[in-house]
Image (tube, rainbow, N blue to C red):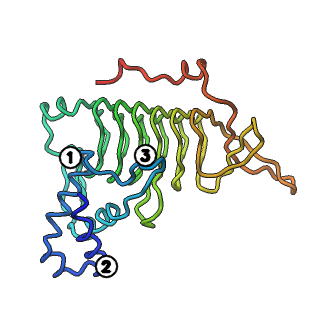
Amino acid sequence: MQHYKALIGKAWDTAFDAHTCQQEGLPKVLDEIIEALDTGRARVAVYQDAVWQVQEWLKKALLLNIRLQENKPLTYPCPGYDKIPSKFEGWDDARFKEARLRVVPGAFVRKGSYVAPGCVLMPSFINFGTYVGEETMIDIGADVGSCAQIGKRCHVSAGVVIGGVVEPLQAAPVILEDHVFVGAQSAIVEGVLVQEGAVIGMGVKLGASTPIFDRASGKISYGVIPPRSVVVPGCLPSQGGVSLYCAVIIKQVDAKTREKTAINDLLRP
């Protein structure tokens, strides 16, 4: 895919000049990039050299694709009028079996999102550019924003919001690493990184400016939930006497926590 990078950069730098784009064969290139994102051969964020790195050129490709496409009537899974079709439009029984997915009616996944084998999608929404790893469940009413990265064997509970980001280009998407559990009605936005095995309790709101208070050390951090942390909503007192919202790391995941948050293999395809 890297050989398309220069073409995407050129189209972006020329402010999407129509003549240039058509001459360079950009529409076909964008179709191939969207297909690569859709099948997991490309990812907006990759883990390299012990850090998550954003591939800005793929975000540019997603934006250019929206600019290039025309709105058109959509029929699956319900009538609509948009530029981006459903990932599952035209799929038959054989295609679903090959993908090893459970997709409950009411789940909407936009083209250009990867959903790995073994996943379960309850009625929910997954935007383009997203990556969802093996055997993850996206529960009822969950909203997974554009370019979010979710690892394997995660559970995103009912009503959860996982924020998306296409712009600014350099901004990191929300990332849930493997084996993360997110409790009902939580919201994780603004590029927060939840590291492997963490458990986010019900109703926790996490953004880039949300204080994360570690009860064991007394330290406050921002933007990253450490591995295997158990996080609940809390508040910090201020000098003015007004308590301010924070997320509290109350402990590390133990056997009791895992018993409560373990995923059920019987629900997987």
Task: Determine whether the residue tagged by mark 1 lies in a helix, strand or loop.
Answer: loop
Residue 166 occupies quadrant: bottom left
Whole-angstrom CA distance, mark 1 to mark 3, is 19 Å
The type of residue carrying mark 2 is: Asp
- Choose the circle earlier in sequence order: 1 or 3: 1
Dot 1, crowdedness within 10 Å: few (<14), some or many (≥20)?
A: some
Q: For the residue labelled by badge 2, is the local secondary structure a helix, a strand or a loop? A: helix
Look at the image and tell me whether residue 82 can be seen: no
In the image, taking residue 227 as reference, residue 100 lies left or right, namely left
Mark 3 vs 2, N-terminal side: 2
Picture coordinates of residue 74, whole percent (x, y):
20, 54
> Residue 254: image x %, image y %?
61, 22
Residues packed near mark 2 inside 10 Å, few (<14), some (14 to 19) or many (20 plus) = few
* Residue corresponding to mark 1: 76
Residue nearer the viewer, 102 or 105: 102
Identify the residue under disc 3.
143
